Image (cartoon, helix red, strand yellow):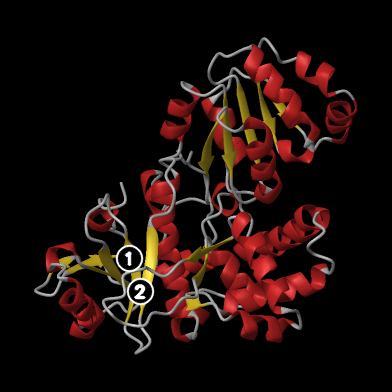
Amino acid sequence: MHVQGVKPIIRRDAEEKIRSLALGFPAVSVIGPRQSGKTTLVRSVFPELPYVLLEDPDTRAFAEEDPRSFLAQYEKTGAVFDEVQRVPELFSYLQGVLDAHTGPGRFILTGSQNFLMMEQISQSLAGRVGIVKLLPLSMRELASAGIETGRYEDLIYAGLFPRPYSSNIHPADFYSSYIQTYLERDLRLLKQVQSLSAFQTFMKMCAYRSGQVVNYSSLANDCGISHNTAKEWLSLLETSLLIVLIRPHHKNFNKRLVKMPKLYFTDPGLACHLAGIQSADDLSYHPLKGGLFESLIISEFLKFRFNRGKASNLYFWRDKLGHEIDCIIEYDGWDPIPVEIKSGRTASSDFFKEITYWNRLSGNTPDRSFVVYGGDQSQRRTAGQLVGYRELEPVVSYLR
């Protein structure tokens, strides 16, 4: 979706959690995919702090060559350090500064190379940093800003990265540039990726598998890489927060269960572009439509959790006979909540077939069973609750 005209300010739901962490921790780290809005968010929440971009060559050189003197400039004021993982040497020195000046919320760290960022935080700053994961915009944030999203096909194709909503850049141009930036700036630094072109092919093969159980051997064969390399590269995409691997739920009810995770992109627009989908209209009859719609809904659930500083509590369930529940929510020690996700716009009794099967096995009740679908009408039915994709609140209440 190409958004024209005056661009509204889009408030982020994570703002409240970031403020509360800054009242308790000496440092707060906001991590997420490149271009997910981290810089805009932290600069709006902490306008009084000096802003330092460590991708700037001169700034980075100073920080690398003389980290003590670099940090001494900000000992009293604190600072926002953007893309701080570019100077890994800073973390151990920053530990000393945080221990010497224990006031809360003094340093705000952002990073898009989360595989490097989290390694440094766990080594040097464990216990001193509150962490929030920031994914791209949520449907709820767009609605709060008064941005019309049209059909869900438009939303899936345009994706939810902030840039196309805050400028007149077309989604296809944005994603083309995004992929090149990710490959050339982030992955070039990693020894696990020797061939960027092979990795780009790997990303495309992952896009074709959106919403599917991962078959590592098939994925490796399609890309001409080893089974272990496929696992390593998936782990990189997961740590970059570009994909999420939803693990199978452990309750087996004496059934043999699938053990491999399901793969979703945290932004459906990125998966669309990687899969070569040219327009929102192309999605109407595309074989990936169902998997991409699932990605949209799963990522909305994840955003709700991450924006509140919580980890994922999402699983899926599938037995060897092919019975499957798309999403199982672990809810505060209670019995898990089943959620089916259907891209169809017209509700059908078939939508509840797997829910009914699960409830018979588990003893779960229809009032705690949901089908999220591509329509707009939410209804309470005998077998469970039907929830329109724009009105996720009945499900979200179990994500709090």
Q: Residue 107 sits in which quadrant?
A: top right
Mark number for residue 163? Answer: none
Q: Is residue 199 left or right of residue 9?
A: right
Q: Residue at x 46, y 86 (%)?
A: 285
Question: What type is the residue that disc 1 sits on?
Answer: Ile
Kindly identify which numbered label has been placed on residue 317.
2
Q: Give residue 118's position: percent from left, percent from top.
A: 64, 44
Residue 82 is situated, as x and y percent measured from the top left of the image, at 69, 34
Asked if disc 1 and disc 2 are in contact, CB closer than 8 Å, the reply is yes
Q: Is disc 2 placed on a helix, strand or loop?
A: strand
Q: Quadrant of residue 99?
A: top right
Q: Is residue 347 visible?
A: no
Q: Position of residue 21 (x, y in %)?
A: 47, 28
- The residue pinned by badge 1 equals 328
Label 1: which secondary element: strand
The answer to whether 71 appears left or right of 389 in the picture is right
* Left or right of residue 22: residue 187: right
Q: Amino acid at mark 2?
A: Trp
Q: In the image, what residue occupies the spot 49% across and 78% down?
A: 213
Based on the displayed image, in which of its 4 quarters is residue 218 positioned?
bottom right
**Residue located at (77% from left, 14% from top):** 72
Q: Where's residue 115, x and y in %?
A: 67, 50
Q: Residue furthest top?
A: 76
Dot 2, how many residues are within 10 Å of its Cα: few (below 14), some (14-19), or many (20+)?
A: many
Q: Which residue is situated farthest in the left direction here?
A: 382
Which sits in the foreground, 58 or 97? 97
Q: CA distance from mark 1 to mark 2?
A: 7 Å
Q: Nearer the viewer, residue 158 or 134?
A: 134
Can residue 129 be seen in the rendering of this structure?
yes
Task: Pick whichever, 366 or 14, lies toward us.
Answer: 366
